Image (tube, grey):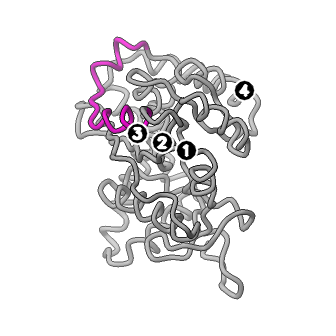
Amino acid sequence: WTALGTLWCLIHLPYGWQLGIGRFIGRLALRIAGHRRHIASTNLRQCFPELEEEEHQQLLARYFESMGIGLLEMGMSWWAPDRKLNKLARIEGLEHLENALEKGNGAILLSGHFTTMEIGGRLLSMYAPFDVLYRKQRNPAMEAIMEKGRNRFTRKAIRRDDLLAMRRSLKQNIPVWYAPDQDFGLDKSVFVPFFGIPATTITATSRLARVSAAPVVPFFQVRLPGTAGYLLTLYPALEDFPGEDAVHDTRRINEIIEARVRENPEQYLWAHRRFRTRPEGEASLY
């Protein structure tokens, strides 16, 4: 609660100050968070093997700075007033979501786990209502604050394994924000490449699109340089999706997310063990 109270105070500072404090927190975490530093460094080495050692260390440092800023952005997404955030947001492609909703089957907002994820959701909510999937937090205080904060700016927060609730939202023509790019084990997952590495990826996007007939609209946000704020981009709904093969669909989704990660690699969530589950016979990467 002390940490959350401190975060609440920090988000009332000018935006430029918040960026500086976030970078400082990130640099501090780079020094003391050995376990997360190892995971992030391993992921970056696997995904960008072409980088020289100095380039690798620079990208790792920029990632931790981005993660520190993301902590402040998380507080902004929960507590900052719209009048402050309006000045920071720019959106492109909103017509793609509107076109998808004209079919009356809702829309699956396909996204990824970036450090800007929380602020991206809050900013999008100022343009369109949607429901969001979430994972329950282990810490009760964090769970209470996150649930209250997300329920302020989304129509409803849905447990990530509650497919029935997702289908209900889509039937009401409500978009559902969905990020499938984490390792949830082998259950209902397949190995498909992510940065050329076999990665367990759930096939739920393909299955949900099939049973609901909801278009899949990619949505990503980017933190812009300096104090320019954020660019939200919605892309045209995927054509011929789902296809006849869920594995092909899932591979296609990973390719979409990978392309966006390559544009701003320091803003992706590298501290997650994305390649934790390995094909039989392969040693752990971590």
**Which mark is first along the chain, 3 or 4?**
3
Residue in front for this viewpoint, 269 or 91: 91
The residue positioned farthest toward the front in the image shown: 103
Residue 252 falls in image quadrant? bottom left
Residue carrying label 1: 178
Real-space CA distance between mark 2 and mark 4, rounded to the nearest whole angstrom: 28 Å
Q: Classify the position of the C terminus by image quarter.
A: bottom right
Real-space CA distance between mark 2 and mark 3, rounded to the nearest whole angstrom: 32 Å
Residue carrying label 4: 141
Q: Is residue 258 magenta?
A: no
How crowded pointer 4 is (Cα within 10 Å; few <14, some 14-19, many 20+) is rated as few
Q: Estimate the x, y position of residue 13 in percent, counting from the top left.
A: 38, 17
Residue carrying label 2: 109
Q: Amino acid at mark 1?
A: Tyr
**SS majority, magenta:** helix
The residue positioned farthest toward the bottom in the image shown: 281
Can you tell which of label 3 and label 1 is closer to the viewer? 1
Badge 3 marks a residue whose secondary structure is helix
Q: Amino acid at mark 3?
A: Phe
Proximity of marks 2 and 1: CB atoms separated by less than 8 Å: yes
Q: Classify the position of the N terminus by image quarter.
A: top right
Can you tell which of label 4 and label 1 is closer to the viewer? 1
Q: Estimate the x, y position of residue 277 in percent, counting from the top left.
A: 67, 71
Residue carrying label 3: 24
Real-space CA distance between mark 3 and mark 1, rounded to the nearest whole angstrom: 31 Å
- Magenta stretch, residue numbers: 81-101
Q: Residue at x 29, y 32 (%)?
A: 91
Q: Residue at x 57, y 63 (%)?
A: 274
Residue 123 falls in image quadrant? top left
Horizontal arrangement in the rendering, residue 260 relative to residue 76 (left or right): left
Q: Residue at x 45, y 77 (%)?
A: 196
